[in-house]
Every structure is written in C-alpha cells, then in structure tokens.
Image (spheres, grey):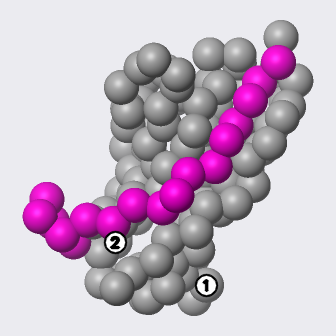
Amino acid sequence: QVQLVESGGGLVQAGGSLRLSCAVSRSIDIFNTMGWYRQAPGKRRELVATITRGGTTNLADSVKGRFTISRDGARNTVYLQMNSLKPEDTAVYYCNAARNMFDTYWGQGTQVTVSS
C-alpha cells in the first residue's frame, strides 16, 4: 500500500507564502503523475497543479504565476510552493499520486487558511 503524507499547511495572511510537502512511502518514479488538489467548504475538489515523471508541469489558471509544483525523487517528495496567497486559496489541499486513472492514491489533506 502507498501512503502519502502532506505537511506545511497553516494560517497565513493574504500576500504571504507557504510550501506544502507530500512525502510518499514509495519511490515517486513509479507514478506517471503527481499532483495537488484542493477542496474549499461547499465546493468540489479541484485540480491545482500536476507534475509528470519527466517534470512537465500543469497549473490551474487561478494559480499560474503564484504557485509552483516540483518533485524530489531522492526524497520521494512533491512540493507546492504557494506565493501571493489570496483568501480564495483557503481550502484543504490534497496530494495525489497516479500510475493511471485506475491506480491512484490520496493523502489525508492539509488545511490552508488565508486571512484577509
């Protein structure tokens, strides 16, 4: 079984920064795609950013220019650097690891709260 553990969430003022980490219990090289998703109260879970094994990244339009996703294969960890945070970024952030659409794993989530 694969375990994903997120960390780095917290309370920050608007304009501030946070870095989320996702530690994986196995080599992240076995996954085609690693990603971050978020879910705000009363809303559906949405994609924030993904990164492929080869390092190709994809970011939601709402976070482009502010967030960066990266991966460290030696540490089996994926990061989400979040800058210029806005109150609308408040959500529970989830890490995802996917070999394919049928073989995917989720972390337990970490809360990010941005105050205005």
Query: What kind of secondary structure does the magenta stretch mostly adopt?
Result: strand
Residue at the far top: name it: 116
> Does residue 71 show up?
no
Q: As drawn, is 52 to the left or to the right of 108?
A: left
Q: Quarter of the image containing the C terminus?
A: top right
Q: Position of residue 77 (x, y in %)?
A: 57, 74
Left/right placement of residue 49 relative to residue 17 reads: left
State the extent of the magenta-drawn residues as a range. Answer: 99-115
102 in the magenta segment: yes
> Which label number is shown at residue 53?
2
In the rendered image, the residue lying farthest to the front is: 42
Q: Is residue 29 magenta?
A: no
Name the amino acid, label 2: Arg
Work out whether 63 lies above or below 71: above
Going by the numbered disc 1, the residue's amino acid type is: Arg
| Between marks 2 and 1 in the image, the one whose residue lies nearer the viewer | 1
Q: Position of residue 44 (x, y in %)?
A: 36, 25
Task: Determine the residue positioned at 61% across, 84% down.
Answer: 75
Is residue 103 something one can see in this rendering?
yes
Residue 55: quarter of image: bottom left
Which residue is pictured at 37% across the width and 43% down the height? 58
How packed is label 2: few (under 14 Cα within 10 Å), some, or many (20 or more)?
some
Asked where in the image residue 84 lies, by quadrant, the reply is top right
In percent of width and height, residue 12 lies at 85, 31
Is 101 situated left or right of 25 in this image? left
Along the viewing direction, whichever of 8 and 40 lies nearer the viewer: 40
Q: Nearer the viewer, residue 53 or 28?
A: 28
Q: Which mark is residue 34?
A: none
Q: Residues within 10 Å of mark 1 (few under 14, many from 20)?
A: few
Q: Is residue 5 left or right of residue 51?
A: right
Q: Secondary structure at mark 1?
A: loop
